[in-house]
Image: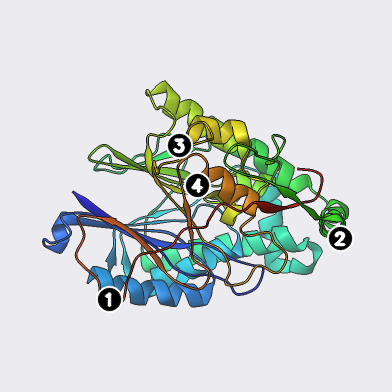
Amino acid sequence: MGYEIDFLPVGEESSGGDAIALRYGNLDGPREEQTVVVIDGGYLDDGEALVEHIRKYYGTGIVDLAVSTHPDRDHINGLRIVLEQMTVKKLLMHLPWSHSSGMARAKMTLSYNARSLRTELRDSLQGATDLEEVAKAQGVPIEEPFLDWTSDDGVLRVLGPTEDYYRELLAEFVEASATLEAKSSWEATLRQMLAGTVYEDLDIETLAENAETTAKNNTSAICLLEIDGRKLLFTGDAGVPALGDALDVLEADGFQPGDLQFVQVPHHGSRRNVSPSILDRLLGLKGQSTKVGTAFASVPKKNPEHKHPAKKTTNAFLRRGYPVHLTQGVSKWSYLNAPDRSGYGASTPEPLHTEVEDSGGA
């Protein structure tokens, strides 16, 4: 079998997102011998671009599976367009109100007085609610992407979260207050003001071990495609604990560091989603001088706040044999046994940066 993976560009300034299309099977054969998957859809305009891309390069108006990893606007909103303008056979998305009484109450509040909800919760619920409504209107069946969900052909498998872990994360998300949200914003501003640079090379790594992201990011569905023994991992915005749980599942099946041929860099290259020990388990030990696999990161066209991607993160992948290719306003294409495309050339990955941003903390 062959495959091709397309990361479409999302975002201009500091805010990026994910809009991913892929297909696998006999890519030179008829449509019936291929499977088309969309993983996240970016913002609404990115959904339009996904539809156009799939029709042009995959030659079809049918998507076999659409996956919403989590309900951030930069991941979920464009999926509405995909469902409205294409024939989607199945949608994977979490239904948070089915697992949390707090989320159920918040969803009800959304219908009557959205202003009473804090911004992050309101936006997430709105995105998920809108996508569910479109799916129902289009007659698209919905299934939830929890551990051990597997596609009918056995190629795509969900490695996490478990339903229990998802419930725990929802409780954290619902209980988070506007005060904590404001505190987080203030701390981010302070870190930016205090940021300096530190030296790194192939052996010297300053990526923090105590990296921490949000509960909502850790709800991301983590998906593995295995095609003729080649492992391709899609991480959404998952952080260290979620990735660790997924690795527990992989390692129980005999996974070894470096077994991946392709990996999505979590959360657009944020340094708060990965740690040296997680990357050692996933990719291998640092100090690699040869390429082991390929990494893609969906990042905005500009990076004025030095967040997405963080040079510490791209360096960490590179020194483990996974050079990182960035979208930055341009589509990126990874493929095996796929038809040629005009207008697509070789991509240059991020180099090893010897000066990296440092804020003195995680």
Type of the residue with mark 1: Lys
Q: Residue at x 26, y 37 (%)?
A: 229
The kind of residue on which mark 4 rests is Thr
Q: Earlier in the sequence, mark 4 or mark 1?
A: 1
Q: CA distance from mark 3 to mark 4?
A: 10 Å
Residue linked to disc 4: 235
Which of the two marks, 3 or 1, is nearer to us in this view? 1
- Rate crowding at label 3 as few (under 14), some (14 to 19) or many (20 or more) other CA atoms within 10 Å: many
Q: Amino acid at mark 3?
A: Leu
In space, the residues marked 4 and 1 are separated at their CA atoms by 26 Å
The residue singled out by tag 1 in the image is 56
In the picture of the structure, the residue carrying the numbered disc 2 is 193
Q: Quadrant of residue 316?
A: top right
Please give the residue where the numbered disc 3 appears in the rendered image. 159
Give how far apart the Cα atoms at labels 2 and 3 are.
38 Å
Rendered image quadrant of residue 204: top right
When the figure is inspected, residue 149 is found, relative to residue 248, above or below; the finding is: below
Give the mark, 3 or 4, whose residue is nearer the N terminus. Answer: 3
